[in-house]
Amino acid sequence: MEFYNLYLLSTYLKKWSFPDNRISLNYSFSLGDIYERNHIDMRLGSPTNMVNELLNHIFHRAKEILQEKEELEESGEDLSSNIILVNESEVKRKVSVFLAKILKEFNLLRRTRGRQRMISTRSLDFYYNDFEYEPLDDDIKFFVHLNRGSNKMSGDLWTNAIDDLRLALDFKPDDIRANRYMATALSKLGRFGDALPHIKVYAEAENTPDSLQALARAYINLENFEKAEQVYKQIEENFPDSLLASFGKALIAYKLGKGYKTILDRIYKRDPEWLQEKLKTDWEYKLPGYGDDEDAMWNAATAARYLGLERPFDLTKRAFNDEIPSYFDSEKGTIRFVKAELDAWVELNNRYKLSDETFEVHEDRLTDAEKRKMQKKRKRKKTAPAVEAEPAI
């Protein structure tokens, strides 16, 4: 009989409801070479009952995962008794203390009748202390750091995530998940050159349209369009039914100022809903040559007038929600916009019906000084791609 050691890595209070008397906990564990992240919705009760409910749920999920393996499905073996929770008594004690703190805060805050709603007890790392971490095998230490990195990514703590993911990769340099997470974190920080080697690892290992597209997008962000084209050709050859290659080639054409809407039109005729979703979530409006030159940009007041919006706030709100292309400098606290990118955003929104709204540009609302300034910028940006005019669908 084969036994499987289950290491509970962390749990995190995700959300709670005072009216429903319920909480939602995220949890993560390792089981052999398996790494699992999941969640459970629970009704508040005694800490003991909640601990039992949580652990029973985790055991059930671990059993499901094992039985998904083909060789175990055929055996018909009941695996419940084969799963051993490592340090079970200590795990139960820690979870009980963790849930008791949540329960105490929950009941206290509920009595404030809405004046205070935040619960401070949020997370539990089972291997936070050195005396618990150091005796672990390297395989488990890998999962500890992989999990910490993933938790920090969930909180948009990209720099902190990189520190833990680097430690995970010290144990398993070729692990697909760790390389994927590292590539994501580095890309979020704009470190595309550093992300590229990690993307190559999982793109080669997975060889799927999505993983290859991630590699192509890294090359696009590095403005190596020739390499990106080569990857998209590979996607076309290996996955002829996928639309990702055509979408990527359209993005390259946009960056280079070529006939990108012709390509998008073909995708739209084939699958309009797919294209609409991809344009909303995965289109990159930023054009080469602008990101490092604030003098080539507008402030929010000018851009809002140009788009016919009543207040700059109406524009910046959309920008911070990643609905409108913009450049935010966190150190200076400034947000800037590029006319050519705004023009492309308006045209694609209207052309492919990306929202219920139809937008217009209002060059007549610009001051003479702003118009003259933009004319000078366009002359200075001769190498930057232009947005070409094409007939509407």
Image (cartoon, rainbow, N blue to C red):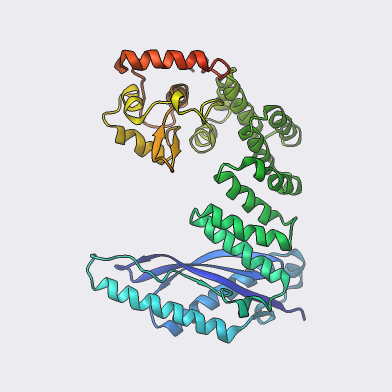
- Reply above or below: 335 against 82: above
- Reply above or below: 175 against 129: above
Can residue 243 be seen at all in this image of the molecule?
no
Location of residue 164 in the rendering, given as x and y in whole percent from the top left corner = 61, 61
Q: In which quarter of the image is residue 100?
A: bottom left
Location of residue 299 in the rendering, given as x and y in whole percent from the top left corner = 37, 29
For this orientation, the residue located farthest to the bottom is: 89
186 sits to left or right of 302: right
Can residue 191 be seen at all in this image of the molecule?
yes
Q: In which quarter of the image is residue 169?
A: bottom right
- Name the residue located 32 percent from the left edge and 68 percent from the top edge: 20
64 sits to left or right of 309: right
Give whichever of 252, 56 is nearer the camera.
Answer: 252
- Name the residue located 40 percent from the left edge and 69 percent from the top edge: 23
Number of numbered discs overlaid on the protein picture: 0
- Reply above or below: 370 against 210: above
Location of residue 381 in the rendering, given as x and y in whole percent from the top left corner = 53, 18
Q: Quadrant of residue 242?
A: top right
Name the quadrant of the N terminus.
Answer: bottom right
Location of residue 120 in the rendering, given as x and y in whole percent from the top left corner = 38, 69
Give whichever of 137, 289 is nearer the camera.
Answer: 289
- Name the residue located 72 percent from the left edge and 35 percent from the top edge: 235
117 sits to left or right of 171: left
